[in-house]
Amino acid sequence: MRLLHICLITYLTLLNEPLWKNKIILADSFSSNPQTIPDIEYEQVLADRYLFSSYANESSWWPVLNKVRSAWQVSSLPDYHNQSSQGIWLLIEREETNELFQMCYMSLNDNGTLISLSEIHINSIGSFVVSSHNKNSMEDYSSALISPNDIQLILCNQSDATSCFVKQIIPFPSFIIKNTTKILSALFIEDFQSMNWLYIGSDSGLHVLNLNTSEIICFVNGINVSVSSLAWSSKHQTIFIGTNTKLWIETYFNGETNWRFEHVNGLIDAPISSLVYNDIQDQLWIGQNTGITLLSPVIMSTGRLHWYFTRLAGQISNPGSDIGHLPFPNITTLGITNSNPSDGRVWLGSIYGLMRFDPNSNNEENAWRVFNSPRYMPNRLSQVDISSLAVLNQIKNASNDLGCGVVAITNRGLSVLRFQMWTLAKKAEHFQNFIDQSDRHVRYGLVSGCGMSKWGDPRTCVRGPDDNDGLWTSMYLASQVFRYAITNDTNVKQNAWKHFQALYLLNQVSGNSLK
């Protein structure tokens, strides 16, 4: 009976076009009618997934990074670099090559092609690369590659992220080399009180390179335990250092340095995995396997700076929580764009995928976006173990509603998320192209399903009859009626008639009649 009604309504609709066209309010973006529903642009995510060579059998649809066994870090380019919104630097492990570890550039517009920075040599998988976003130093260095043995200051062409060379090598003292196996974090703090510093967090402790004198200060403030992450608030002139047992806070005030710490398992309930400071919110995000803790500043009546903790709640907001609805716990890494000004969106990597929080959203629930499953991650399973992420800089002259792209390293490959401003018309065209492909969905005028002979590979689509063909066709036919109402395209009308005739035939052979 439902199919009969759909056929009847469609038949009368297409047959009496002048009648219904005078009754419906059309969403025509070119009309000056005040009743028109505008086709407003929105942010559309585009996902690319790349597999490491050892996981090439995961899917025949996802491209494979040729001879790349793994990657352990991804880094954004300097904010001032011409390609800072288009690509990233990767530290990778190759297969069957003399140079086992390499630093490469990857363009997001070049289908996963990696270009090795041949002038940069990496001797350890414990190395870490960090970019400098300071324009005043861009003639001296663009980034630093830090290994357990030394610090390499790298200078790159400002228009070509593949054209880089080592400007200076600064070796660590022998007792640091002896006790260090991995560099876990690094942070440039430049043009601050006539000082230029490179803070380095390693599994042996906290070290600082004075970029003016090339002097290395070891075990700053006596911190000789593994440092997982570093963050900086320029507004409050404060550096944050995360370890398994403490959050160290170093504040500069009136030319003096003040140190303090907060114990983990006190106000912070688990070891710190990552830190990031969001200047838009004016908050420190503290990542842990239990979720997120937030640290916020308040200026006391005495003028003294005070910090207070709140908890980022889960699905149900807890008393005293700052923001509700944290999608996943198990935070492995945090990131934010280095664009100036920043878009304020915080990215969170976890063992289950990527999350993004937008503090500019008016709706608390809509502020969160979650990117997990094979739709966004190069993995059939839900657990993807994101180990590193890099947020790209904003595209020049882009809409404020458009977020920055992000690249994440997972246990099986890379996830690349890019954003574009789309309209509903563009989205409809995108999906219409799938229906219009020959030998894909349409059989004898009916819209049918399309199973894949290989998991996740749409190129292996196999059509076949299904008892839901009438349902899919009726839904698609209804969409084409509205499409014709918007476009007035005679080809759309003819296409709709073709599907209507298929439904009419289906109705007849099933013993029903429109008469």
Image (cartoon, rainbow, N blue to C red):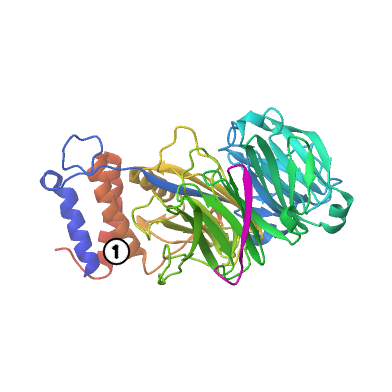
Instruction: Give above or below for 407 relative to 170.
Output: below
Q: Position of residue 413 (x, y in %)?
A: 65, 55
Q: Locate residue 168 relative to residue 430 in the image: left or right.
A: right
- For the C terminus, which image quadrant? bottom left
Residue at left 34%, top 46%? 424
Question: Quick one: 212 or 415, which is closer to the camera?
Answer: 212
Q: Who is closer to the viewer here, 137 or 380?
A: 137
- Residue 97 magenta-highlighted: no
Figure quadrant of residue 168: top right
Regarding mark 1 in the picture, which secondary structure is present there?
Answer: helix
Residue 11, given in percent of the width and then of the height, sits at 19, 54
Q: Which residue is mark 1?
A: 506
> x and y percent of residue 400 in the render?
41, 40
Callout 1 environment at 10 Å: few (<14), some (14 to 19), or many (20+)? some
Magenta span includes 257: yes
The answer to whether 40 appears left or right of 338 in the picture is left
Res. 59 in view? no
**Residue displayed at 82% across by 49% down:** 100
Q: Would you place residue 68 above or below residue 88 in this image? A: below
Q: Quadrant of residue 275?
A: bottom right
Q: Classify residue 474 by image quadrant.
A: bottom left
Quadrant where the N terminus lies? bottom left
Residue 120, image x, y percentages? 79, 39
Residue 28 in sight here: yes
Q: Which residues are magenta?
A: 254-267
Residue type at mark 1 is: Leu
The residue that appears at 78% across and 58% down in the rendered structure is 204
